[in-house]
Image (cartoon, coloured by chain):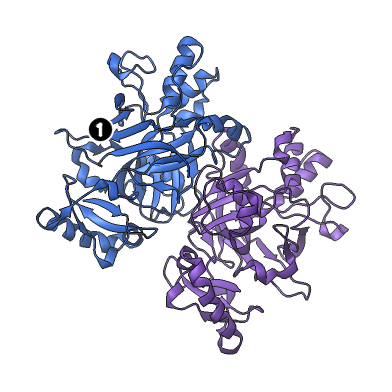
Chain colours: A blue, B purple
Amino acid sequence: MKLATLKDGTRDGQLVVVSRDLTKYLPAGPAAATLRAALDDWDEIAPQLEAVAGKVDGEGAAFDPVQCMAPLPRASQWADGSAYVNHVELVRKARGAELPASFWEDPLMYMGAPDAMLGPHDDIEASSEDWGIDMEAEVAVIVDDLPQGITPDEAAGKIRLIMILNDVSYRNLIPGELAKGFGFFQSKGPTAFSPVAVTPDELGDDWKDGMVHRQMLVEYNGAPFGRADADVDMTFNFPKLVSHTARTRDVQAGAVIGSGTISNKDADGTPGKPVADGGKGYSCIAEIRMIETIRDGAPMTPFMKFGDTVRMDMKDDDGNSIFGVIDQRVVKYG
Amino acid sequence: MKLATLKDGTRDGQLVVVSRDLTKYLPAGPAAATLRAALDDWDEIAPQLEAVAGKVDGEGAAFDPVQCMAPLPRASQWADGSAYVNHVELVRKARGAELPASFWEDPLMYMGAPDAMLGPHDDIEASSEDWGIDMEAEVAVIVDDLPQGITPDEAAGKIRLIMILNDVSYRNLIPGELAKGFGFFQSKGPTAFSPVAVTPDELGDDWKDGMVHRQMLVEYNGAPFGRADADVDMTFNFPKLVSHTARTRDVQAGAVIGSGTISNKDADGTPGKPVADGGKGYSCIAEIRMIETIRDGAPMTPFMKFGDTVRMDMKDDDGNSIFGVIDQRVVKYG
């Protein structure tokens, strides 16, 4: 089942069920006017949504992803991990710091703003290019209620929906903010999500071991930029990340939990080569800058400027988009 | 106007209007079934709530704060500051670290879990006493929509409601978590709020310069523990904190923005004396432990154990509770 939220002038939008090929949709109906309402009572609502899904190919209207909000425009919380420790190791290496051993055992996770969720075609509106505007291509899940202390095994059964996302980051604001010790705050921009959120069963064999087994296809200004495998170098899978969020608190249905930037070492063990050279490329600009710093002593690739575009997609074996495309332009705010 | 949310089995509860003396209530009515709905459209809904408020003394039913959820059980975001820099300076001093000068100019703020909001009489359910369970008495505001880059002057006009709260913290989890660099995550428990949220006009002269000019009365296991003045040593007022949250992102109506632990230097310039000795006392246990560490080389006061109770209140000139009382017991989870 694939779900989307259409812009209708309200804050939570209109929940619709989308066909597998992303061409048609039907309204979810009054019992589930919004995805938030559906998640509040998932066990009861999901079968009704499945019934709508059974009719969407025959009866659906044309689906236009440009009309999409984020599938869940206001999440109950937005917790983002850093599960690809390769990425974290690169950050450290670029500034000559060691990676603590605990980083391989205990997930890094930060709390983001769950009310700053963009649709897949919404602009990235930043007040200044000086912030160091960057993309981060990630996978995220939406979970059901989690009791405090839930184990990873139990957490696996609480994952209701899967999306891809662009976690906009303001790199030049990060060092000062992290130095203050309280984590990211202003250094994270709004987060953009794929047109649809899909149930795990929809992914078939591409969802196993708590990971999505597909490549994250990133294009930057129209050119291939990243081809990282979401199931490679993912040190902490989603059940582990989900469990982490609930260690000391109950978590309410509708929490969005992200993987962090997808990042692969290349096959030859190097930290990352451009797609044009047959490498996996990058899911964010910071990574290529870190590699340039390690290799050349200084970064060369600039961060994003007004007018730059980023596109993220994930395709199935037949080359069809699974989640729909994130396609954003950076513009000056206001 | 004073607003509360009663437990009715739903996640967002039932919005009610409460009399100034906190003895009576009336349902807010179908136009504003929940505080979230009211905040989504405040300019239109507030006059309707005012109309209900005009009838509550005459027509209201008996108000029972034990039946309260947090006024806003699911916030659009929960951003907590550390505006009383005296507190931050003490933390640093206790571990022999200098306070960076920027801490007096740029607010410290962390992003919390906006779905873990407790009612004023709900238990603090922790899985382990080893976490170092602590209270933090604070003031918070609920704001309307904030555009990116809003100034403190503009932000002052976006403050819709004011509450007090207990920001439960797990002190023994903080050092490890902050060392990882991404800020608080598991080291913050659920947050409990006062029975009612009040509009700024309700406070009269007690709300000026963007601060609440009253004492935070904290009792710990039935004994006076803190009498800190919320308007003293508050380095960053609420308009400044609100502005900080929106520097790089739009913020949606329904965000809760906290002051951080209220903390006063004592009149003689010492960092804090017990209430029994005529001092201002403490709004959290960590503070007395820091003072003990600075004075004696080691902390003596333990953190909270199962069965311990904490009570927070703020009274007007006539000795009447303004927000109602937070009264919680620590219990073992589950």
Q: Mark 1 falls within which chain?
A: A
Q: What residue type is labelled 1?
A: Arg
Could you tell me if residue B233 is visible in this image?
yes
Total marks drawn? 1
Q: Position of residue A331 (x, y in %)?
A: 43, 37
Q: Where is residue B53 in the image (x, y as percent from the top left)?
A: 58, 80
Residue B62 image-quadrant placement: bottom right
Q: Which residue lies furthest to the top in this view?
A: A296
Q: Mark 1 points at which residue?
A: A214
**A113 up-or-down from B5: above or below:** above
Q: What element carries label 1?
A: loop
Q: Where is residue A3 in the image (x, y as percent from the top left)?
A: 25, 52
Does residue A246 appear to the left or right of B85 in the view shown? Answer: left
Could you tell me if residue B133 is visible in this image?
no
Q: Which residue is drawn at 77% across and 50% down?
A: B233
Q: Which residue lies furthest to the right in this view?
A: B268
